Image (tube, rainbow, N blue to C red):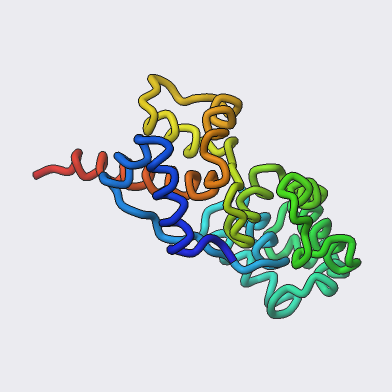
């Protein structure tokens, strides 16, 4: 499971003591809600299905796949499912290869999502063996599903944007700059990422509210 509310608060309080910008951000927008996903095949499969489609479209594809393959989309059954069945459910040819890659690795026990390496970089390396899962997807999974508190998805544009906003940069810092800046925030970088998304959402929502007609 992901970081709990208590763990988030502990880490963010520690970050506020390290970097005053976090203290000011917490005063403005408060603590974020936990982002927790179940560990295992389903969470990664939902991530793959949801790539580059709307939430409603991803949900519809998932429902059609369950109707065709069976509830829970068991990886053994999914690995053996005919491609035509998955195309009819709404998956592109490319996504079928991604879904099959995940299902085959799990079904063959070549990938055990309940026993990933304890070392974060080794765990990322295990996950990116799956077609369609890059570093960002692996980091998000490890943060939300396993609660690895120092995962730092520096390639996320919203994280980059908000780190720049929090620290008063004139422009959005690059992925490398964000990785370098966050070295001082170890071992709390996962909470920093969750707070960055929270701060981004609140800031954008406040900006929209300011533009509403009176």
Q: Quadrant of residue 100?
A: bottom right
Which residue is found at the position 86% from the left and 62% from the top?
104
User: Is 191 situated left or right of 25 in this image?
Assistant: right
Which residue is found at the position 52% from the left and 58% from the top?
55
Q: Quadrant of residue 21?
A: top left
**Above or below — where is 68 with respect to 4?**
below
Across and down, in percent, residue 13 comes to: 39, 49
- The mark tally for this picture is 0
Q: Which one is nearer the viewer's eye here, 94 or 180?
A: 180
- The extreme top residue here reads 170
Which residue is found at the position 65% from the left and 71% from the top?
64
Across and down, in percent, residue 140 comes to: 61, 51
Across and down, in percent, residue 142 comes to: 65, 55
User: Is 194 situated left or right of 100 in this image?
Assistant: left
Quadrant in the picture for the N terminus: bottom right
**Above or below — where is 207 with respect to 63?**
above
**Above or below — where is 132 with respect to 38?**
above
Which residue is found at the position 59% from the left and 42% from the top?
153
Q: Quadrant of residue 135?
A: top right
User: Is 76 situated left or right of 90 in this image?
Assistant: right
Across and down, in percent, residue 98 comes to: 77, 53
User: Is 19 situated left or right of 183 in this image?
Assistant: left
**Above or below — where is 78 with respect to 47?**
below
Q: Which one is nearer the viewer's eye here, 192 or 56?
A: 192
Quadrant in the picture for the C terminus: top left
- The extreme left residue here reads 214
């Amino acid at each position: 499971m992901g970081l709990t509310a208590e763990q988030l608060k502990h880490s963010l309080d520690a970050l506020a003591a390290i970097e005053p910008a976090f203290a000011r951000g917490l005063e403005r927008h408060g603590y974020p809600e936990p982002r927790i996903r179940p560990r295992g095949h389903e969470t990664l499969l939902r991530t793959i299905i949801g790539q580059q489609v709307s939430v409603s479209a991803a949900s519809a594809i998932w429902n059609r796949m369950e109707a065709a393959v069976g509830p829970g989309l068991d990886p053994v059954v999914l690995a053996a499912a005919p491609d035509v069945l998955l195309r009819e459910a709404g998956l592109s040819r490319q996504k079928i290869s991604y879904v099959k890659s995940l299902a085959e690795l799990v079904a063959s026990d070549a990938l055990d999502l309940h026993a990933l390496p304890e070392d974060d970089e080794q765990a990322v390396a295990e996950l990116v063996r799956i077609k369609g899962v890059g570093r960002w997807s692996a980091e998000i999974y490890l943060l939300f599903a396993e609660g690895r508190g120092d995962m730092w998805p520096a390639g996320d544009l919203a994280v980059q944007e908000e780190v720049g906003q929090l620290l008063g940069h004139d422009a959005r810092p690059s992925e490398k700059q964000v990785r370098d800046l966050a070295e001082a925030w170890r071992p709390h970088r996962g909470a920093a990422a969750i707070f960055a998304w929270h701060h981004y959402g609140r800031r954008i929502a406040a900006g929209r509210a300011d533009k509403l007609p009176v």
